[in-house]
Image (cartoon, helix red, strand yellow):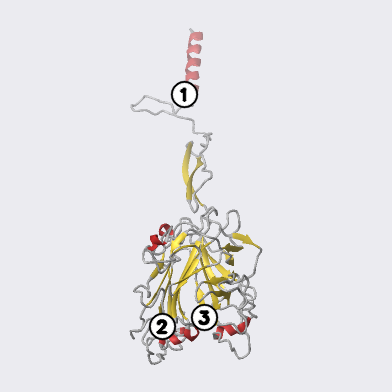
Amino acid sequence: MRSLLRLLLAFVLLLAATDASFAVRGDSPGRAQPVADTRVQIAQVPIPTLPIPTLPIPIGSTTTTPVATTTTTTGPSSTTTTTTSATTTTVGTCAPIVPSAAIANTYRLDGTTGEKRCTTNSAANRFGTCNTDADCGGTSGACLQLPWVTADGQVMPFPTGVQTNFTVTPGTFPACEHSACVPCGNPNASCAGIPGCEVAGNPNGCVPRGTQGCCDQPGFIVPTFFVNILGGLCSRVDQIDCGVGVVNTSNPQTGDNDVIKMADTSDPGADCCYNGHPGSECLGGVNTNDDPPAALCTPTGAGNDFKGKIVRTLGNGSPDANGIQFRLSTPELSTTWTDSQSPQGTCANGSTYDDGELLVSQIVLKAEPTSAGASGAFVDMNGDGCRRAGSGFIAPTNADTDGPITVPGGAAGPLRPQSYDGTVGAVTGAVSEVFSGPNSPIRDIGFVAITPNQPAVVVPAVTCSCTPVAGCPE
């Protein structure tokens, strides 16, 4: 019996020792349930592997990548997993001017030939494509292969060897509007193409600026070309100062580089501002109300001087067509003369205006070719009833001679940007007005120039710096 009692007692003690590792807990009295040991345990929970986006990522895009983090808490044993987001912004880049070349470079645009387009004086389909004069309203000689220039209705085939050299300083994304500089060197160096203007006393009647020389390292180069009027003339264009502009490579294109020039032949005085106009329109920012008495609105009156006002406006309120857009302004001196050394009815390559030859006209231009679109007109800005005293864009008897004359860009053409891939060159155009003064028989004229170009190329570096100085009439 005692042995049996000892055995029962040992069994009870064993049960008591086992129950010591549990706490009594339950929904009803007397019912015990086990709970986990309160000793610290660190759970090993694997961190999930999340995919991270790889290129390509759109230019200027922002990507958000989820990242898993694990927090371990002691106490009762637990593991918390929290997901956070990391944001990465990819810095956008501008399209290059020449594929695979840095934007900061020196470039050259070379002129080339283009399709046939109806000229400014066409009776119909102005600037439209054509095969014959019939497509231009029957106007004789109006269907002409590009490049060409028109002034007061006179049509002049332009040489294809035109070159424009310029350096580019990169702009910033997303505007991607890069400043351009057309070099000049010394703007008052001896002008090899017009030695007839360097004779003491100016016996040949060159305009004042024509006697002051021209650039000895021009970025804008135009070969001498033939003008088929008055039995055949020679004409040349010389750069007389540095030029500036922009090249816009945004993609899609966000620039607005249309150039609009409005002109009035009336003399605005030394402040280049008509009486009563805001000072912001005047040289020096102050209107001195110094307009001289109005001259007769005739070629021998208001048209007999170099004075007037041209207001330049950039942009037409709409983004330009997609592609590499160019807009470059270059001060130029245009000289046209009868060349005694060229056979009758021709202009020999490399001809120069020499002492004793007949100067037909010499005018100062501030052409601003653009690939986006160009427009110009003669308008009455001061209310004196006189806007033009000369031939205008076409002829004094033509109802359209005051303009506006608009050379469209984009799908309407003929102007167009260079393609982003560099396979198609730009077509640039300039529209502006000139107060040619007493040395020109046509006085106040409007001119239009349209020039196709080969795709831009990188050339040896040239240093260029240019700070334009505001002047009159423009």
Nearest the viewer among 402 and 168 is 402
The location of residue 117, given as percent across then percent down, is 44, 61
Q: Mark 2 near mark 1, Cβ–Cβ under 8 Å?
A: no
Nearest the viewer among 86 and 209 is 209
The location of residue 6, given as percent across then percent down, is 50, 12
| Number of residues whose C-alpha sits closer than 10 Å to that of mark 2, classed few (under 14), some (14–19) or many (20 or more) | many
What is the distance, in whole Å, between disc 1 and disc 3 at their CAs? 121 Å
Q: Mark 3 near mark 2, Cβ–Cβ under 8 Å?
A: no
> Which residue in the structure is indicated by mark 3?
361
> Which residue in the structure is indicated by mark 2?
265
Q: Can residue 418 be seen from the camera position used here? A: yes
- Pair 3/2: label in front: 3
Q: Given the image, on which type of amino acid does mark 3 rest?
A: Ser
First in sequence, mark 1 or 3: give its number: 1
> Which residue in the structure is indicated by mark 1?
19
Judge from the rendering whether residue 253 lies leftward or rightward of residue 185; answer left or right: left
First in sequence, mark 2 or 1: give its number: 1
